[in-house]
Image: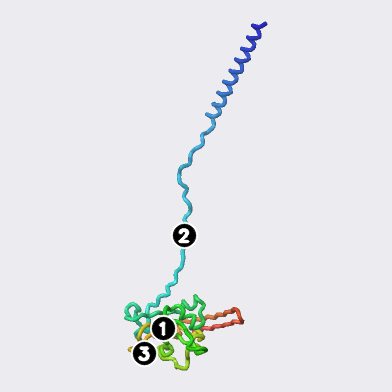
Amino acid sequence: MATKSQHSHRRSASAMLVSAILLTTSARAQDASAPAPTATNSPTQLPEVVISAFQRDYLERTVETAAGIEADPLEVPLTTVSIPMDVLTDQQVNNVEDALRNVAGVSKFKQGNGGEEKFSIRGFDASQSLYKDGARINNAFNASNIATTETANIERYDVLKGPAAILYGQGEPGGVINYITKKPLFTRYNSIEALVGSYDYYRGELDLT
């Protein structure tokens, strides 16, 4: 009986070993038949992205205040600053005071306690150096009146820094502020603008030529 039991154990062990070998062989066969994953090392090209921007050029090509005639500001031996209409439009400027804030060295001050307000250029009183289209503005118009002057009919502001007596006669050594008014155009142009702000601020502008 012992011999038969040993034989039966050997048969069952042999059968289990054969089954394990068959399972291993079958698994290897399945692994061999399955397609191997392919490695994708090629770079992926993204679509082209184009970014564009617009930069406005505020440089004035000619100035009249520094020479009395149209001239290139780089060829004039004087320091000139022009505030063109594009700057006034982009900044929504509607008075002289706000426009002249773009010029270094130009400021507004009050003379005395409760006195009138005036402009200064490089620290010198500019009340005698205010011009409109090259003509001196009446002395009665001090900065308190000029500062609130509308810019609706202004083409640009020219500021000449430094002594300008050779061009404009008697004046302060600080410089000259010249307002250039709009001129009629050769082509038809119509513009309507309305502004509403705080503290009951309303402003309308109509420009026709």
Kind of residue indicated by mark 1: Gly
Mark 1: give few (<14), some (14-19) or many (20+) Cα within 10 Å.
Answer: some
Q: Which residue is rendered at x = 57% and y = 24% of the image?
A: 26
Is the residue 104 above or below the residue 169 in the image?
Answer: above
User: Is 97 displayed left or right of 15 in the figure?
Assistant: left
Which callout, 1 or 3, points at the residue further toward the start of the chain? Answer: 1
Q: Is any part of residue 79 visible from this angle?
A: yes
Tag of residue 123: 1
- 168 versus 33 height, above or below: below
Which of 116 and 195 lies nearest the eye of the viewer?
Answer: 116
Amino acid tagged 3: Tyr
Residue identified by numbered label 3 = 168
Q: Residues within 10 Å of mark 2 (few under 14, many from 20)?
A: few
Using the rendered view, name the quadrant where residue 134 is placed: bottom left
In the rendered structure, which disc, 2 or 1, sits on the residue that comes first in sequence?
2
Query: Which label sits in the foreground, 2 or 1?
Result: 1
Q: What amino acid is at disc 2?
A: Val
Query: Does the CB distance between marks 1 and 3 fall below 8 Å?
Result: no
- Residue at mark 2: 50
